[in-house]
Image (cartoon, helix red, strand yellow):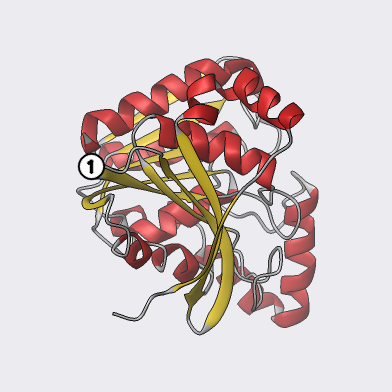
Amino acid sequence: MNTRFILRQEIKLSSIQEKMISSGWGSETLENTLVEKITYLSGGLKINGYLAYPIDQSKQYPCIIWCRGGFGSAGAIDEFNAKGIFGQIASWGYVVLASQYRGNVGSEGEDEFGGSDVDDVLNLIPLADELEFADTAKCGIEGWSRGGLMTYLTLTRTAIFKAAVVIGAIAELRNNSGENNFMQHFIERMKLNYTDVDFQKEFEKRSILNFPEKLCSTTPLLLLHGTNDNRVSPEDSIRLAEKLQELNHPYKLVLLEGGDHFLKTHRDETAELRREWFDNYLT
């Protein structure tokens, strides 16, 4: 089989950074996991991302596909945060694969914010088949903010995932969105590429509230949202939960009181909820 991996390179941090990782994400994150930068093929493009996994490779581990937020450099995952974010999940006993998406951080192509870049998420899945320590029969997916939008769209195209977690997720793109800079950059660029009518259609095609019935009905969804999120309104998750209830789609909505977009004041609680959800469905 021809490999889809072009590059795998272990991340090396300074001793000061390692101490910060241990303090912020736990000593297990630093001591029990490996995190690598990767480059892989997606639609003929070279895409950058990350791979994380437990140091102990004597057995297989369930897989989690992780979807970043933001647009362009805003929300991009650097090596330090990759070691913390993905290393923590790997320390729970998972293999983690994450994409920076096309057009970002040296990846080829152009970011379409939920267009063909969704393929960059889907094309992480066969990468796991090349890892002897990955149990590809047990796969989950997680997305934050724009990554939640990417997660929703991915779940309309595959039934492979046995569990999904979204945090502060965009369920509806708004033409007059002013939540943050990356949305404004996206809107400005989209207006250059489309007429006003087509522009609105592109927004609608990326908004899961318009077609929740297309979500894989066998993938349980955990929706986490801070009540003080001023970037993506909690109403996105509340309205989607209402539609999931009508569709009898398995889900759980947790609104974290006073939480901002990044749930900084609910860090431990958020980690516990995510881990519990994945452990329940993937282990």
Is 196 situated left or right of 132 in this image?
right
Q: Quadrant of the N terminus?
A: bottom left
Residue type highlighted by circle 1 = Lys
Is 158 situated left or right of 150 in this image?
left
* Position in image of residue 185 (x %, y %): 79, 61
Q: Quadrant of the C terminus?
A: top left
Q: Secondary structure at mark 1?
A: loop
Residue drawn at x 49%, y 16% is: 269
Q: Residue 154, located in which quarter of the rendered image?
A: bottom left
Mark 1, residues whose alpha carbon is within 10 Å: few (<14), some, or many (≥20)? few
Residue drawn at x 64%, y 79% is: 109
Q: Residue 250, located in which quarter of the rendered image?
A: top left
Residue denoted by label 1: 59
* Position in image of residue 230 (x %, y %): 71, 32
* Position in image of residue 91 (x %, y %): 42, 31
Residue nearer the viewer, 276 or 194: 276
